[in-house]
Amino acid sequence: MSFLHDPQLGNTAITLMAALVLVLQIAMVAQRWLVTNIRVFGVQSFVLAAIAATIAWFNHANHLYVAALLMLLLKALLLPIVLERLVAKVGIRHSIHPVINVPLSVLISGGLTLLGYVVAESFYHPEETSTAATLGHNMLPIAISLFLIGFFMIVNRRNGLTQVLGLLSMENGLFLAAISLTYGVPLVVELGIFFDVLVGAMVLGILMYRIGETFDSMDVSRLRRLRG
Amino acid sequence: MMATLAKAALQLLLLLIAAPLLSGFIRTLKARLQMRRGPGILQPLRDVWKLLRKDMVIPETASWIFAATPYVYFSTAMLVGLLVPMIATAAPLRLFGGVLAVIYLLALGRFFMALGALDAGSSFGGLGSSREMTISAIAEPAMMLAIFTVAITANSTDLSEMARVSVSQSWKFLAPSQMLAFSGLFIALLAETGRIPVDNPATHLELTMIHEAMVLEYSGPYLALIEWGASIRQLVLMTLLVNTFFPFGLSANWTPINLIPGLAFYLLKLLLLAGAVVLVETSNAKLRLFRVPELLAVAFILGALALISTFLF
């Protein structure tokens, strides 16, 4: 089974999965249905967990397995389930109305990817041979684009719940940057970020629920007026 | 010279016969998936044969464009068919610009089709033309970007050269750029051949039709030429897709010993792609016309990302 340790194979697998992560991110921008959006986010987190596990396998970095497992349990399973429950509970209309229309949003995401690439290019020095240690070093442009597109999603959407999704996918970008460049920040920091975002998402979820109850919609643009 | 002619003749024959059969196969498979019996694989060939022997009705308002359109549509499809490697890596014809010639010849056929539909003077024709042009204006750049991705990897826009290079580096197709380009081109293929998320080939419902609205005024041999041409275009686009991205089994030269396994592989790949198209068609509903640009924007971005990622990885 020596081919399972071949860095070339790892490189192919990781670049493929990273491209898939990027495509899923753009799919989230293009997707109009809230529930599908949440599921796409779940799949994206799952692929990220797979990337982390692959890097852990080729570098024998065991602490990355923990990160992958956490990613899988919390962001690929728990969060989508919680968010879907929330959608069912509030019973809001399930389609998203972005500020900018969908084709233009998709084009802007493409532009942001380009920007991510331009920014990351100055850090990128292609190595001649791909060894286990350099695995995933070309992931930085994708991580930056994930971050930018996530940010764009937050700005572009009025629905509070999808803004939470944007925030979470931004965090996915950070995770990708961390695992591909440094093989994970120390585990404690990793755990800190994880639970921070998790708790943040939970709190936001409750907040969204309250907004939904009060205004019969999750449209945050209705929050302008003060109510006594 | 003789050898080139023989190759061209062989490929033309394959195009003429395989294209209606492929349309028939897609129709039958779709019918079976929907628990219907379906008309049988030979039906499009029978249709063409019957239409060729029928009388024509030509609208009084029509000019020469109406009569020229079927010929232009059919012959551009055939010409493009000669430019694309089907069973051997070397296509029988090499034109300037290679893949650019392919895209623009297809566009020329489409342009005449839209003109012919307008020329007939019915309101449906105009409606069909405007829809077709709207869609192709977005589908075409997506197609170009996706194919350029392969062209950059192969360092040539010549399709035969592209096929030769991709045969020599067999596992290259797993690179992200290739996958992205493939998915972009697949969506563009659905749009260009009028398949379900974009257009429904099986309906004459005025609200939704695109291709059918354009050919509404045509009858007899003209209609036969158009339908035949449309199925050849479909075959050519699908060939482009399977042979540039999955070049397995393309025979390196035109000797009979290599051609037979080449043909078998080619048909197998085509049938698999047709199966994928049928799956998409049966599992999706037709999109609202105003939602189509969203789908095509995704195809465009996939193509653009593919192009970016050739420089990235």
Image (cartoon, coloured by chain):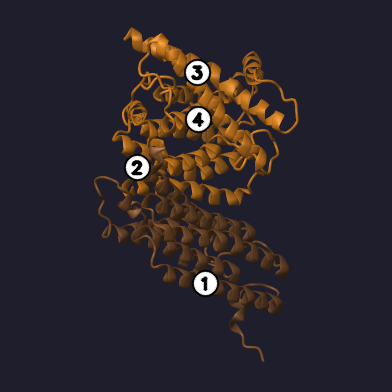
Chain colours: A brown, B orange
Q: Residue at x 63, y 14 (%)?
A: B49
Measure how far apart labels 2 and 4 are at the Cα level.
31 Å
Measure how far apart labels 1 and 2 are at the Cα level.
34 Å
Q: Which mark is residue A8?
A: 2
Q: Position of residue B5 (x, y in %)?
A: 37, 11
Q: Is residue B51 left or right of residue B176?
A: right
Q: Earlier in the sequence, mark 4 or mark 3?
A: 4
Q: Position of residue A13 (x, y in %)?
A: 42, 45
**One can see residue A136 in this view:** yes
CB contact under 8 Å: marks 2 and 4: no
Q: Which residue is mark 3?
A: B264
Q: Nearer the viewer, residue B48 or B249?
A: B249
Q: Which residue is mark 1?
A: A195
Q: Amino acid at mark 3?
A: Ala
Measure how far apart labels 4 and 1 are at the Cα level.
48 Å
Mark in the foreground, 2 or 4:
2
Discs 4 and 3 carry the same chain letter: yes
Packing grade of label 2 (10 A; few <14, some 14-19, many >=20) is some
How many labels sit on residues? 4
Mark in the foreground, 4 or 3:
3
CB contact under 8 Å: marks 4 and 3: no
